[in-house]
Image: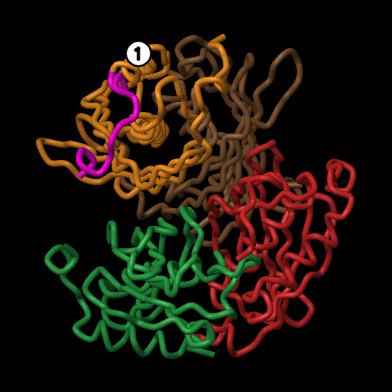
Chain colours: A red, B green, C brown, D orange
Amino acid sequence: MPDSMFEPQNPDFEADIRASFARQGLMCHLGIEIVDVLPGAVTLQVPFSQSLTQQHGYFHGGVMGAIGDSAAGYAGLTLTPPGSEVVSVEYKINFTTPGAGERIIAKGTVKRAGRTLIVTNADLFVEKAGTQSLCATIQQTIMVLSANETRPAG
Amino acid sequence: MPDSMFEPQNPDFEADIRASFARQGLMCHLGIEIVDVLPGAVTLQVPFSQSLTQQHGYFHGGVMGAIGDSAAGYAGLTLTPPGSEVVSVEYKINFTTPGAGERIIAKGTVKRAGRTLIVTNADLFVEKAGTQSLCATIQQTIMVLSANETRPAG
Amino acid sequence: MPDSMFEPQNPDFEADIRASFARQGLMCHLGIEIVDVLPGAVTLQVPFSQSLTQQHGYFHGGVMGAIGDSAAGYAGLTLTPPGSEVVSVEYKINFTTPGAGERIIAKGTVKRAGRTLIVTNADLFVEKAGTQSLCATIQQTIMVLSANETRPAG
Amino acid sequence: MPDSMFEPQNPDFEADIRASFARQGLMCHLGIEIVDVLPGAVTLQVPFSQSLTQQHGYFHGGVMGAIGDSAAGYAGLTLTPPGSEVVSVEYKINFTTPGAGERIIAKGTVKRAGRTLIVTNADLFVEKAGTQSLCATIQQTIMVLSANETRPAG
């Protein structure tokens, strides 16, 4: 239960994450949307489009990587001090079933939040005719940059 | 030296890869292009665009994952028998420097080609004012589906 | 709940896993023991010893990798047909806190069982004065070798 | 060429690494030995013994993880300032062929050295009757702890 386990340090975490998300050109270009932002847990979704396909007309693995990495990274950002940013150090993604369906939902969660490094996970589900199947799973490391370490955007 | 180390089994590997690539809606949507296709080595590139950015206006990590996974996977596909396909089992990506520049070049190479599983790598370079810097590195596993295992595209 | 989610295909899965474990010289050499073997979930433990240390006298990360890889792989083996074996294709381990304590417990679980490939996880806990802390977490891919593919032991 | 690419900051890097290695109980218990320590590159080896086996009598994957993680981590430590330590953040290992042979050689190299994080690789070779075959490959992240961050051993 992320809500009870994790106590956010930044009271404006949700607004800050929505603002950061809105500045990412790629999220808009792929049609990725925020479903919800909770302490230690961020869920994103992306509806199917021909622009997102691999050679068989299913969701491309590149879309899964992009949405999963983002969901997991933003889950980490819910728990950092005000003014912080996070950067992905690395992630690892396993693909478990083809992405054949109408949308993908990516549920990012925090596994362990250290002061400098946060370990997160994301489970990705492809939805087809109302049924959700696990299509990918991610284990990720992010690094926290404190307010005075972050570079000016630009 | 991929050219000398690896002997392709499919004489049409380059044409088959270009045809597969052309069917991937995501590659076109992101502006990813083929640079070259050699035995055991495929290089892709993507020019910068506002559609590909993270919150600071640099290349988004999701773009790096998509181009790197594709370069590495297609490198594997250069070595499989005619009619085969490959699917990504998993990959792991480390981000080493922000993607600030005019384009990203992804060089996929085969590390070891087994009959069923192929281990590949990709190194990603961001180019800025003529200088290339390593921005990400990938270690990937792909699975070979023989001609009679592959599903009809549909 | 692994017990309800997973239906073993091999009625002798526990005996087969205990027999396989007993043949692994490394498990004995490191002092790793089986805690329990359930459908889709295997727990192992290892008591502290000076033979298992890194330079500060804590459990070495190499011990965590060995016990975690084994717990996750055997969790996968609980779900395969009689006579099968599994081999680790790859795993990824994050270290989350130093291994300072009296023993490590590794809980391997199956994330998704395909016919050829199984994705598993393991969470590792270090126990100190009765308190358990997550010290590492693993995401693993294993491949199933059917009874007629397995090589004679030897 | 690690020798020319990397300029060590610590003139005593080799002696410091040999001293750290000697304090690791696990290295001795597994019979792992240093082959050489160069700037950005550390090679370790381990001779075969029944204590290091999996169920078929080959080298256990746990041995490969332990020697590879150590070779890669120490490669990183060759490049850090005097008094620093490194800790493994995470690593990912692919197994490419069974470890059937008389010894394993692990060649750790630095991929990119940042101030806080270092990305490394290790290639592992099993030697049988004079022939070396790649048996595993690692991509690793380590974190540098500066002299005043490191904890007293104990």
Res. A42 visible in picture: yes
Question: Secondary structure beneath disc 1?
Answer: helix
Q: Is residue D58 left or right of residue A120?
A: left
Q: Position of residue A115 (x, y in %)?
A: 69, 36
Q: Nearer the viewer, residue A105 or A146?
A: A146
Q: Is residue D12 magenta?
A: yes
Residue at image position (66%, 71%) is A24
Q: Position of residue C41 (x, y in %)?
A: 65, 41
Q: Is residue D131 left or right of residue A135?
A: left
> Disc 1 marks which residue?
D19
Q: State which chain disc 1 sits on.
A: D
Residue at image position (28%, 61%) is B113
- What's the residue type where badge 1 is placed? Ala
Q: Nearer the viewer, residue D89 or B130?
A: B130
Magenta-highlighted residues:
D1-14
Res. D54 visible in picture: no
B51 over D52 or under it: above or below: below
Residue at image position (16%, 70%) is B7
For residue D106, what is the image quadrant? top left
Say how many tags the image has.
1
Q: Position of residue A137 (x, y in %)?
A: 62, 58
For residue D16, what is the image quadrant? top left
D94 over B102 or under it: above or below: above
Question: If the image is split into quadrants, where does the C terminus of chain A sit?
Answer: bottom right
